[in-house]
Structures are given as structure tokens and as C-alpha cells.
Image: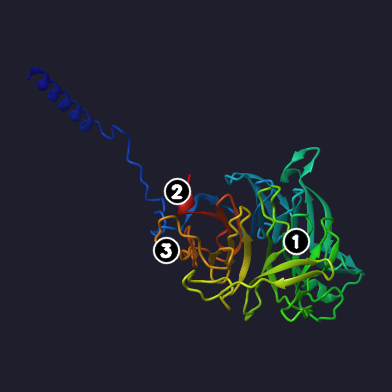
């Protein structure tokens, strides 16, 4: 009993001391400045990963390179920025008129910008692909980058220059496994008999930046369409990081179109090589309408309005992501063109779960004019141009595996 009375007495003293000492444990931290978490209560959904990459002016492209670094093309600052995989800033490099960036497997950057030139005492600003070598005697990285080549429109296929050439521009680059690459190009002159092909085109360059040809698509009737592409914009091949011996070598690509009213705004083109008939390019057909498998489809006519960015998973899942700048949204599809992702084990249904999301806004699950999308190691990156940032997302099912 005596010990119990002593214990009660000690507790009383402690309570008195703590209550007498104002803010004994320090002042309570005011957390009102923190935004409430924005998450979905669906069993499978994308959740934002923080921190994102902030402080950008108008980022129009984002990639995760073969060197496992993040590269951002900031059109507002006219600079390429590099970050490590955690999002820590590393370096930057200025490119006039910068709009997009890509990397080949030699770890050279290919950036689309502009170049000013004077011809016959007249100044012209021409669309240009800059090749940047990142590895030299000073070490590897964007801080040591050197421009080693410029591909200027239209001088890769002609020595002449028309006034309309200043209105023609490169948009995006899709690099293949052998380091040759496709480029989307748009412009006002689209005659099928035009030298160099219509301005609206997907064109191919060799690994050494030599122009090879426009891509002509063969239809189901075996007719070849020289004017198949209408305002092509985003483009991606199936050769995606990480570096490995199993990188896809097919030469297939997915492109987007921002032509108003164009019924099929995102398409995959298959490159086929025949020993007798040579190379041909044909549309890959994806099924539409089977609602037992998905509630949305990549090839639904007029599904998109302004699909500015597209990417493919390089980890074997074959998922495809599209961002629509007009709808301020991110969409995900599987390798069969069904919208959504495969349900987790024990889910109770085999139908794809829709994880597309977006809408106009500035919080962590909304966008303002998203321009590009990238994917690496289960993380999706979105260039949210209007909000001046790069956002990162991961599926709840992938989070649970960590």
C-alpha cells in the first residue's frame, strides 16, 4: 500500500509539472499549410508520388533515358534539364526553340529546337534536330554536353529553301534499337508528289542522322498511301529502356495525330521486312467494343482530342500511355488496346480495371495541358506543361509489392 501511494504521488507531481510548464514538449506544429492527400479509394488506381519536379516554366517533354536519368525539355526556358532517378537536379543545357528530347542507345541526346540562318540577306528560323554528345574528356553528363550535329529542315533532303519551309517543323523523335529513328513532321504543304514527301509525315533517319525516306503506309488493299499522316505529333517505338539484350528490335511505332476531326488519333504501325518485296508499313488493328474485357479502347474513334504524348512500357508488360492536352488527362491501355490494367489476384473479375484519370486543375491528380508522358520501373512521369512541373505516379498494386 505504501508503495502504491508513493507511485500515485509521483504521478501527481509529474502531471503538475507538465501542466505548469507552458509548452513543455514545444509548440504544436501547424500543418494547415499541407494540402490534404489526394487519392482514390478504388482498389487499383494511380497515386501521386512526391516530390515531383517543380519550378519549370513550360515543360513539353519528359523521358527516362537509357542512362537511367530523367531529361525534361522546358520550352519556356529553352533548356534541357537532367535529374537523377529520385528527381534531384543535375544540370541543364540551352537549345533555342526547344520542344522535345530523346536519347539513343549510344547515350546521345536528340533535341528538337530551331536555328536561325541568313540566306541571301534574309533571316530564317528553321526547325532543327540537335545531336548532343554527353561523354567526353571532362566526364559524362549534360553539364559536359557538346553539340556534334544539326539536322536542319529542309537541308537534309534538298539544297533549296522555300518560304513555306519556315512553317514546317519537327515534333517528336522515336528511336529504334539500332539507333536509327523516326521523326514526326508537320507543315502546310502536303502534295503527294512533293519532293521529300508531304510536310505532314513520319520520316526516318539513320543512326548517323542521314535522311532515309518518308514512311508510306500500305493499306489492306495493298495500296501505298503517301499522304497517310495528318498532323502527326507524338511518336514512340517499342525499343524502350532498360538497356538489355532483349530490347525490342521490330521497328514498329505508335504515333498520335492532333488533326481536328481525324477519327483515329492514336495508331500503331507495323514494320514488316519481306525478302522479296522489301519493307512495308501497315496499320496494326486493335479490337474495339468488347465490354466484357474493358470499358474503353485505344482505337475508339474520336476518343482523344489533342493527344500530344505517347509512350510504351519497356519492361515486357507492353502497356501504352497517352496524354491528351485538351482533355487534361492520362490514359493507360494494355498490349491489346484495352483501356486499363489487369486485375490483381483474387479481384473477382477478369475485366480490365480503368485507371485513366485527370481533368483540369493544379492538385496532384489533375493537369493543365499535359504534353508528354514517360515510364520507367513502374513509375509514370507526366510533363504537366501548364502547371510548370513533372508529376510522378505509381499504381497502388505496384506500391503493395514493395
User: Closer to the camera, 51 or 123?
Assistant: 51
Numbered disc 2: secondary structure: loop
Q: Quadrant of the N terminus?
A: top left
Q: Residues within 10 Å of mark 3 (few under 14, many from 20)?
A: few
Q: Say whether marks 3 and 2 touch (CB < 8 Å).
A: no
Mark 3 and mark 2: Cα distance apart in space: 20 Å
Q: Residue furthest top?
A: 2
Q: Say whether marks 1 and 2 touch (CB < 8 Å).
A: no
Q: In the rendered image, which residue does mark 1 sit on?
A: 113
- Identify the disc placed on residue 389: none
Q: Residues within 10 Å of mark 1 (few under 14, many from 20)?
A: many
Q: In the rendered image, which residue does mark 3 sit on?
A: 349
Residue 182 seen: yes
Q: Say whether marks 3 and 1 touch (CB < 8 Å).
A: no
Q: Residues within 10 Å of mark 2 (few under 14, many from 20)?
A: few
Task: Give the residue at x 36% y 45%.
Answer: 30
User: Closer to the camera, 191 or 316?
Assistant: 316
Numbered disc 1: secondary structure: strand
**Mark 1 vs mark 2: which is more N-terminal?**
1
Q: In the rendered image, which residue does mark 2 sit on?
A: 400
- Relative image position of residue 391 (x, y in whole percent): 54, 55
Specify the quadrant of the image occupied by residue 222: bottom right
Amino acid at each position: 500500500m505504501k508503495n502504491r501511494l508513493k507511485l500515485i504521488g509521483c504521478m501527481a507531481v509529474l502531471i503538475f509539472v507538465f501542466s505548469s510548464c507552458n509548452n513543455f514538449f514545444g509548440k504544436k506544429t501547424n500543418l494547415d499549410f499541407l494540402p490534404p492527400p489526394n487519392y482514390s479509394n478504388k482498389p487499383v488506381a494511380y497515386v501521386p508520388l512526391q516530390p515531383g519536379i517543380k519550378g519549370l516554366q513550360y515543360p513539353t517533354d519528359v523521358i527516362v533515358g537509357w542512362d537511367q536519368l530523367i531529361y525534361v525539355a522546358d520550352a519556356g526556358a529553352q533548356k534541357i534539364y537532367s535529374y537523377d532517378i529520385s528527381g534531384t537536379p543535375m544540370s541543364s543545357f540551352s537549345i533555342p526553340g526547344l520542344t522535345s528530347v530523346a536519347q539513343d542507345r549510344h547515350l546521345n541526346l536528340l533535341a528538337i529546337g530551331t536555328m536561325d540562318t541568313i540566306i541571301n540577306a534574309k533571316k530564317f528560323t528553321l526547325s532543327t534536330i540537335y545531336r548532343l554528345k554527353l561523354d567526353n574528356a571532362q566526364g559524362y553528363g549534360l553539364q559536359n554536353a557538346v553539340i556534334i550535329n544539326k539536322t536542319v529542315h529542309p537541308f537534309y533532303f534538298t539544297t533549296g529553301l522555300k518560304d513555306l519551309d519556315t512553317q514546317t517543323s519537327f515534333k517528336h523523335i522515336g528511336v529504334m534499337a539500332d539507333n536509327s529513328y523516326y521523326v514526326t513532321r508537320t507543315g502546310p504543304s502536303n502534295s503527294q508528289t512533293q519532293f521529300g514527301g508531304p510536310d505532314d509525315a513520319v520520316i526516318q533517319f539513320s543512326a548517323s542522322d542521314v535522311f532515309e525516306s518518308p514512311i508510306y503506309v500500305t493499306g489492306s488493299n495493298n495500296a501505298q498511301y503517301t499522304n497517310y499522316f495528318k498532323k502527326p505529333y507524338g511518336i514512340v517505338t517499342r525499343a524502350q529502356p532498360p538497356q538489355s539484350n532483349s530490347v525490342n528490335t521490330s521497328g514498329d511505332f505508335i504515333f498520335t495525330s492532333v488533326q481536328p476531326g481525324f477519327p483515329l488519333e492514336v495508331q500503331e504501325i507495323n514494320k514488316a521486312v519481306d525478302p522479296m518485296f522489301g519493307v512495308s508499313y501497315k496499320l496494326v488493328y486493335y479490337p474495339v467494343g468488347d465490354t466484357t474485357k474493358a470499358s474503353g479502347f485505344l482505337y475508339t474513334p474520336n476518343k482523344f482530342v489533342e493527344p500530344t504524348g505517347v509512350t510504351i512500357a519497356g519492361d515486357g508488360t507492353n502497356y501504352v500511355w497517352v496524354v491528351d492536352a485538351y482533355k487534361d488527362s492520362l490514359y493507360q491501355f494494355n498490349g491489346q488496346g484495352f483501356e486499363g490494367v489487369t486485375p490483381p489476384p483474387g479481384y473477382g473479375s477478369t475485366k480490365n480495371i480503368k485507371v485513366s484519370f485527370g481533368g483540369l486543375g493544379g492538385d496532384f491528380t489533375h493537369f493543365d495541358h499535359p504534353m508528354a508522358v514517360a515510364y520507367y520501373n513502374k513509375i509514370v512521369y507526366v510533363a504537366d506543361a501548364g502547371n510548370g512541373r513533372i508529376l510522378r505516379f505509381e499504381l497502388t498494386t505496384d506500391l503493395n509489392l514493395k
